[in-house]
Image (tube, rainbow, N blue to C red):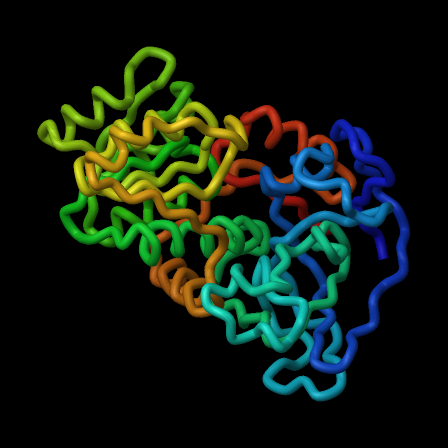
């Protein structure tokens, strides 16, 4: 099979299309023919060696995929060749951890394409337990935008943020992959949504997604705008995928007794917060990673019902993985980017 892999850490150009052995499904596993795979910012960081260099090279990235069952391993039931499927973007590698909740807290939990070869390939082997049938009715490219951003957004907004009807919710970087789903999810739950952008194109996109307040951070102070918008109180819930120096500003934009959910570090892995002001205001800071299978299936149901729509910016062919990484790494994508197998 062909796969887009890298043999050294570095710029996007290290990604090359090469011929590699096609995996054979082991007991309890299925072999999925990948029709399209998603490209996430996490994979840009991994390719650069920013997060970890404890990865055996050469390596195939990718956690998100849409595909069809090509072969089932011994002991697998419930799937037959040709079924349209979507694998979970992360799961425990040790079956003894399968019942851990939250799933991403399991000792052996791993996002796809980090400890094992991922979905930037024509085929991928996945434990059958972590595969769901695709009933969305969407194209493979649209489906490939879903897994990581959907399961992460559902957990951040619905489970951890506990967003309810009538809440004022701030979602940072609204045109980003996870954020574009979080906006739609919060709106579907009946919340009022504010979001931040840094271009007119992104502003137009998030308005189409239903954002009630769009703040262009090049011109406006989002803290002031959000407080004014929420009748002087601040956001009930803030979803922060930026980290760094933005995290304190997200806290500032959140009301007394409000919740800040942190789940990213686009602007930096280290943050300094004003401790006294934080606890004097009875605020809560909650961390989250990716969701459970139940959250994933719930999110896919919302997609199938048309309540949440995929935001596909551009599809590249597998051989263009480097170009896809350049676009995502430069914050040039309006929504999600995918690789399709020709």
Q: In which quarter of the image is the N terminus?
A: bottom right
- Residue farthest to the left, as pictured: 231
Q: In this view of the protein, which residue sits in the foreground, 330 or 260? A: 260
Q: Position of residue 339 (x, y in %)?
A: 67, 45
Q: What residue do we see at 25% from left, 40% from top?
A: 283
Q: What residue do we see at 53% from left, 40% from top?
A: 336
Could one spot residue 136 in this view of the protein?
A: no
Could one spot residue 174 in this view of the protein?
A: yes
Q: In this view, does 217 lie to the left or right of 14?
A: left
What is the quadrant of residue 169 in the picture? Answer: top left
Above or below, 176 relative to 75: above
Q: What residue do we see at 49% from left, 55% from top?
A: 290
- Residue farthest to the top, as pictured: 219
Q: Where is residue 244 in the image (x, y as percent from the top left)?
A: 47, 27
Q: Is residue 248 left or right of residue 326?
A: left
Q: What residue do we see at 74% from left, 33% from top?
A: 322
Q: In this view of the protein, which residue sits in the foreground, 101 or 207? A: 101
Q: Where is residue 119 in the image (x, y as percent from the top left)?
A: 70, 54
Above or below, 256 relative to 22: above
Q: In this view of the protein, which residue sits in the foreground, 136 or 38? A: 38
Q: In this view of the protein, which residue sits in the foreground, 227 or 75? A: 227
Number of numbered discs on residues: 0
Above or below, 98 relative to 338: below
- Residue farthest to the front, as pictured: 276
What is the quadrant of residue 106 in the picture? Answer: bottom right
Q: Position of residue 96 (x, y in %)?
A: 62, 77
Above or below, 252 relative to 91: above
């Amino acid at each position: 099979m062909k796969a887009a892999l890298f043999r050294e850490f570095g710029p996007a150009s290290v990604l090359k299309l090469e011929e590699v052995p096609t995996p054979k499904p082991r007991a309890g596993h299925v072999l999925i023919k990948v029709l399209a795979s998603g490209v996430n910012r996490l994979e840009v960081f991994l390719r650069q060696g920013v997060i970890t260099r404890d990865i055996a090279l050469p390596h195939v990235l990718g956690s998100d995929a849409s595909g069809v069952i090509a072969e089932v391993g011994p002991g697998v039931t419930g799937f037959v060749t040709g079924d349209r499927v979507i694998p979970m973007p992360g799961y425990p590698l040790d079956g003894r951890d399968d019942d851990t909740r939250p799933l991403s807290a399991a000792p052996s939990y791993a996002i796809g394409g980090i400890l094992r070869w991922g979905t930037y390939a024509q085929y991928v082997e996945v434990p059958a337990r972590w595969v769901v049938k695709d009933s969305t009715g969407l194209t493979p490219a649209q489906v490939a935008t879903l897994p990581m951003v959907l399961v992460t957004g559902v957990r951040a907004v619905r489970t951890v943020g506990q967003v309810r009807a009538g809440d004022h919710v701030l979602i940072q970087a609204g045109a980003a992959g996870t954020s574009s789903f979080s906006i739609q999810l919060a709106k579907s739950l009946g919340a009022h949504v504010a979001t931040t952008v840094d271009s007119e194109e992104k502003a137009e996109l998030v308005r189409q997604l239903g954002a009630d307040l769009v703040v262009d951070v090049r011109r406006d102070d989002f803290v002031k705008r959000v407080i004014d918008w929420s009748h002087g109180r601040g956001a009930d819930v803030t979803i922060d995928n930026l980290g760094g120096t933005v995290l304190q500003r997200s806290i500032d934009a959140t009301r007394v007794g409000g919740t800040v959910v942190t789940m990213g570090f686009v602007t930096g892995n280290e943050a300094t917060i004003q401790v006294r002001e934080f606890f004097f205001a009875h605020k809560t800071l909650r961390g989250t990673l990716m969701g459970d299978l139940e959250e994933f299936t719930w999110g896919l149901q919302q997609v199938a019902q048309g309540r949440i729509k995929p935001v596909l910016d551009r599809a590249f062919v597998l051989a263009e993985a480097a170009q896809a990484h350049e676009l995502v790494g430069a914050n040039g994508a309006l929504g999600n980017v995918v690789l399709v197998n020709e």
